[in-house]
Every structure is written in C-alpha cells, then in structure tokens.
Image (tube, rainbow, N blue to C red):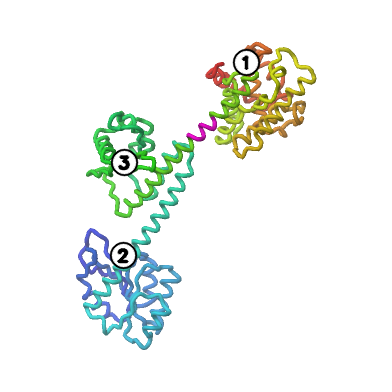
Amino acid sequence: MDFLAASPAALPAWKVLLVDDEPEIHEVTRLVLSGFRFEDRPLQILSAESAAEARQLLGRHEDLAVVLLDVVMESDQAGLELVRFIRNDLGNRNVRIVLRTGQPGQAPEHEVITRYDINDYKEKTELTAQKLATTMFASLRAYRDIMTIEANRRGLERVISASAHIFSHENPAEFASAVLSQLTGLVGLERGALYCKVSGDFAINPGNLVVAAATGDFSRFVDHPAGEELPAHMLVTLSAALDKKQHQFRKDHYVLHFTDSQQSESLLYVGETWDLSDLDYRLVEVFCTNVSIAFENLHLNQDLLEAQREMIIVLAGAAESRSQETAAHVRRVGELAAFLARLSGMEPSQCEQLRYAAPLHDIGKIGIPDAVLNKPGAHDAEETRIMRGHAEIGHRMLALSRRGILKLAAEIALTHHENWDGSGYPRGLSGEDIPLPGRITMLADVFDALGSRRCYKEAWDEGRIREFIASQSGIKFDPALVEKLFAHWNEAQAIRAQMPD
C-alpha cells in the first residue's frame, strides 16, 4: 500500500519505501513525515511489512529515492538479505538505504557498515522526529546528487553517440538531416525545429541564411533562403541571435546560437512551446557545438576532395591534350562510366569513385612519343607496341598511391583495353576476369570517342556508332553492358550533349 504524505503538487513526490514488520512504526513514521518537503516536493511513502512484500514494490518502483529498512522481520537477517537483493539482484546503486534496528546487537553497526552497501545506520530509539527529518534530508540530498550525476552521464553518452552518428555523414544533405534526427533522440524533440548555417552578413542579405535541416512543419523550408521563406516572427528572433551572438528565448520559441573555431555561425530554432530542463539545455549546447565543428570539418573535407578531383581532371586533360583530344572527352568518360556503373548496380560511393577514376584511363599517354601518339595514319607493328605501352605506363604511375580513387584509376588504366574475348592487351584477360570498372570504362571511352573528331578520323553518326558497338558485343565489349547502354541510349547521348568539345 502507499500513503501520500503531503498534498499533491506540480512536482513529482519523492518515493520512500518503509519496510518494517511493526504496524505502529509505519503509523508513527507517516505522522512524523506528514508535512515533510524537500526542494518543494512532498514524500510518497510506500509501506511493506515484510521483505517479500518489499521485493514486489521494489520491482514496480524503480525510482525509489530512500528505503527505511528494519533488520529483523521474517528472519533475523531478512533486512540484510533485502540489501543484497537491492544492490546485487536489482543492480540498484542509486536508492539510499537507511537501516533501522530495534535490536542493535543482532546487527552490529560496524559489521553492517563494513559488509553491506548501506548509507546510514540508526537505532529506532534514537530516531526522534527531528533526527528522522534530518536523516531524510541527508538521504534525499544524496539521492538527488547521484541522480543528477547519472543523468549527466547518460546525457553525455547520448551526446557522444549522437555526435558520432553525425560525424559519420559525408554528404551535406544527409548530415543536416542527421543533426535533427539525433537531436530528437537526445532530448525527445517532437515539435518543429530547423537548423541553419550562416554565410556572410545575414543582416545585410537574409539570403545568406539557408535552412540546412528541419522537422515538422518547417520541413518545407529546407534548402531555401530563410529571408525569403520563413515567417516574420522567426526572422526577428534569428536576426537577434546573430546580432547579439547569444541564445534568444521567446514565449513560444527560442533560437540557440553557435560559433565554431573558424567563426562560422549556425542557428537552431525550436518552436511551439518546447521547454528545456537545465540538463537538456546543456546537452543541446554540447551537441550543437559538436554539430558546428562537424559541419566545418565536412566543408573542409569537401573543399579538399574537390581540389583533388579537379587536379585529376587537369591531369587527365593534360594526357588527352597531347593526343589532340579534349578535356571534355575525359569528363564525359567519367560521367558515362558512373552512369553505366549505376545501371550495373554498383553502390553510389563506387559510382562516385568511378566518375573521377575513369578520366585517368589514358594517363599513360604522357609517356608515348608525339610522333607515335599523333600519327594521322595507321601504326606499324613497332608503333603499335609502343602505343599499347600506355596501359602499363599509366598503371605504374598510379599504382603506388594509397588513395582509393587513384588505386581504382590504376586498375582502369591497366585493363580498359582488355577485350571480352581475350584478344585485348596488355594481359589478354577475358570475360569477367576483366575487372568491371575496366569493362565499363572501355565501353564509355569508345562510345564517346566514336562520336568525336580525332586526328585520324571524323566523328561518326549515331547509327554507325550503334552498329559498331552491337557488332563488338561479346568480342570487344561485355554483352551485359552493351545491353544496358542500348536500353538507355538516349540518356547516354544526353550526357555527351551536356559537355560538348
């Protein structure tokens, strides 16, 4: 049974379990604590007259703050056995246990304190009304502090977990969505919220504030300039947060302002009367600081990646320019290779790598003499041998790199002249022994080259290209890839048209 020791209040009551086989102890304890309050919260006293009854209540109430426990009940050791049950079986290290005994010789204080995880030891004769209240104050204060520490520990674990999740996203759109989804799990966010990144001076140009992620009713604003889309009252608060570089709290919404180490600013808007506890506020602040750092690192990484990819295109273009071909050709080969890779069921990340590795397929031409490379007519046997050496040269140039894109490019450089029937070079591979990226790049390269003018030929018309590729299916080209190309011919032609010579 339970007893509410004070009138109901807005804050939840502290739960206290009184375990004693003497009914009058229950009556007196309730009477003494009837007006007791700690931090403006009353007590809810749960009563058990045996250890067995206490076990049932302990199983139903995991948020007990204090247990006032008699030692001798069904047996001389019933109370001490219940202590073991609480600490060991239930694993509850938070509840404060005050041992009360009317027979101190049965459970000597020094022995009990040493052997059992209890928090206080009192003889019933010394528990006057004042001392009982003092004991309750001390126990609840300790419980409150323990629960605060525990809540902070769990909160920080959630922040670490949530931060690790957002740091794992390399795509900006995925990253922004992950921010709010993890915030939801962090503090139970259910109402509308949006996350904004600031570039430039928002006060001068509201278009510099872009909504990177949003939940609820605000989802429609994602990727839109805030100054053009958001309601006026939201813009007022966002502007105030940026002007003052401080969090802004309003009656029904607030904006948290964050600045990273590079002075890049971001804003988190939360609306519709969502209240943060002090702990929630600290967790959100730590999490959003991590978000700002992660966002900054994401952009730095993207800048570096784009620089690397641009350098790849420049190198590939330099190789092609020696043979009087164009940088547009190598870009088209990359796009066509990624296109065929998607049709072949490769993972998006693999398709993206192929987009930047395929343009380096002929990088080995850098090592071929101009007289051979740009000869207008047919090559003789020796010139053919020299020309074919570009596959091995390109592989040697790229193979030592530890970068995934360049390792893939090395494989493509070596295998993009291997024919499906085994008649290609340099190793005479056939069928599926030829790596798929090499097979894809060969088809993409030939498809684009046939439609382009070269020093040794004019551009072919579409019908002639289709006829040639069909005739070489199963000889030069992977038949499955040819089938996919023909099924999506117009899309492949559109890719070529987008990047003319």
| Highlighted magenta segment, given as a residue range | 303-309
Residue 157: quarter of image = bottom left
**Farthest residue toward the bottom?**
105
Image position of 220 (left or right of 422)? left
Q: Residues within 10 Å of mark 2 (few under 14, many from 20)?
A: some
Which residue is found at the position 45% from the left and 37% from the top? 299
Q: Are marks 3 and 1 in contact (CB under 8 Å)?
A: no
Which secondary structure class fits the magenta region best?
A: helix
**Farthest residue toward the right?**
381
Local secondary structure at mark 2:
helix
Residue holding disc 3? 269
Which residue is found at the position 22% from the left and 61% from the top? 9
Residue 496: quarter of image = top right
Local secondary structure at mark 3:
strand
Residue holding disc 1? 451
Query: Which tag, 2 or 1, sits closer to the chain's start?
Result: 2
- What is the spatial separation of the Cα atoms under label 3 and label 2, in whole angstroms? 31 Å
x, y (%) of residue 425? 75, 27
Q: Amino acid at mark 2?
A: Arg
Local secondary structure at mark 1:
loop
Q: Residues within 10 Å of mark 3 (few under 14, many from 20)?
A: many
Image position of 200 (left or right of 163)? left
- What is the spatial separation of the Cα atoms under label 3 and label 1, in whole angstroms? 53 Å
Image position of 381 (left or right of 47)? right
x, y (%) of residue 240? 25, 38
Location of residue 307 with respect to 136 vertically, above or below:
above
- Reply yes or no: does residue 90 show up in magenta: no
Residue holding disc 2? 144
Location of residue 380 with respect to 19 vertically, above or below:
above
Q: Amino acid at mark 3?
A: Tyr
